[in-house]
Amino acid sequence: MTLVHRPLRLRLDGAALVANWRRLAQESGPAACGAAVKADAYGLGARDAALRLSNAGCRDFFVSHWAEAEEIANWVGEGAISVLHGVSADDMDAAIGSRARPVLSTPLQVARWRDTGRPFDVMVDSGINRLGISPGDVAAGLLDGLRVETLMSHLACADEDVADNRTQLAAFAALRGRVDAKRMSLANSAGIFLGRDYAFDLTRPGLALYGGIPRHEAEGTIERVVRVEAQVLQRKRIGPGERVGYNGTFTAERACELAVINIGYADGYLRGFSNRGRAFWQGAELPVAGRVSMDLTTLRVDAAPDLAEGDWVEIDYDLPTASAGSGLSQYELLTTLGQRFERIWS
């Protein structure tokens, strides 16, 4: 079978991924450190990420849907898999046939799963007003006599220094002993850096595993995992006053050199980078000129006189820098990376 060339690629650093997990595990203290590999490991490839983390010692993995649990089931060894969106009536056949555990978040889900006699996890809403049963449901005995593996909740503002974090911490800590759960879990990536009080028995990092910086305390300790590269399709020269791209949002003040590269918003390089993003080639900085389109982006390349058709450029995709420049969150930058990339793990 002939391999088809892909003109854009992600270079993924497996050693950096593992180093980030070990750093987060260290920061978690005596608590176990799991890994959120939902959304295809934040766009980087769930199977490859889960395998590397499992080999490094991670034993708890978190996905959103049952299809995601199936995707990694053979890649995590004896590791536990928790399905964060619980179990709907449509999920029951797949869930019963899976070794993964549902994270139940409504009284109806608890009733649906009760008759299986199998263990499960529970999400309690401690203040984010997203998924989760209420502390009142717990107090009323909803979980009495059931086999709860992990009682968890989720912080709303862990990336900020606000009173809400301590309020949620107190609300969750008050449930200790009210539920016969083997473990309690609250902290995501940002929550880990709020301090050991937030770690409980198990932490659930996601963003920081993949090179994101959730809080300033993580700066200098979290390594970059993903680098984005795209191939040059065409080089051209335009004159003063000529415009570039849809709606002509870039106008050349003088004659300049352009390169059109093989990436666009269909690949997750979104329009927030229009006239704001940049790429690099052999140390030269190449600004985006004009609007990012579906499959193409144009660069100003006067600083790279030898750059030619077929060469590869690296997109500036350092997550904090790209987030500040584009207005997109670090989460969006990762999870929108499309399936047209060749993913190359080192």
Image: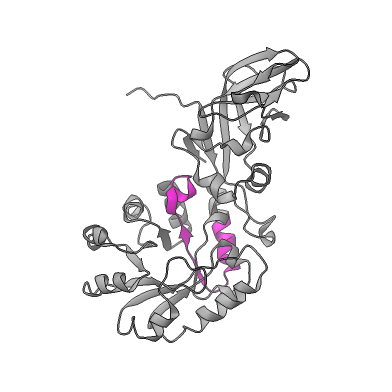
Q: Residue at x 42, y 82 (%)?
A: 136
Farthest right residue in view:
254
Q: Is residue 221 left or right of residue 205?
A: right
Question: Residue 54 in the image: x percent, y percent?
Answer: 43, 57
Vertical placement of 45 versus 7: above or below? below
Q: Residue at x 59, y 67 (%)?
A: 192
- Foreground of the two, 37 or 335: 335
The quadrant where residue 26 appears: bottom right
- Foreground of the two, 246 or 147: 246
The span shown in magenta is: 20-45
Image colouring: one colour
Q: Residue at x 59, y 77 (%)?
A: 167
Q: Count every numbered label the image shows and give the total.
A: 0
The quadrant in which the N terminus is found is: top left
Q: Is residue 173 left or right of residue 256?
A: left
Question: Residue 180 in the image: x percent, y percent?
Answer: 37, 83
Vertical placement of 101 versus 172: above or below? above
Q: Residue at x 52, y 57 (%)?
A: 206
Q: Is residue 38 magenta?
A: yes
Question: Residue 52 in the image: x percent, y percent?
Answer: 46, 51
Vertical placement of 277 versus 113: above or below? above
Q: Is residue 63 magenta?
A: no
Q: Is residue 59 left or right of residue 328?
A: left
- Foreground of the two, 2 or 70: 70
The quadrant where residue 3 appears: top left
Question: Residue 106 in the image: x percent, y percent?
Answer: 35, 71
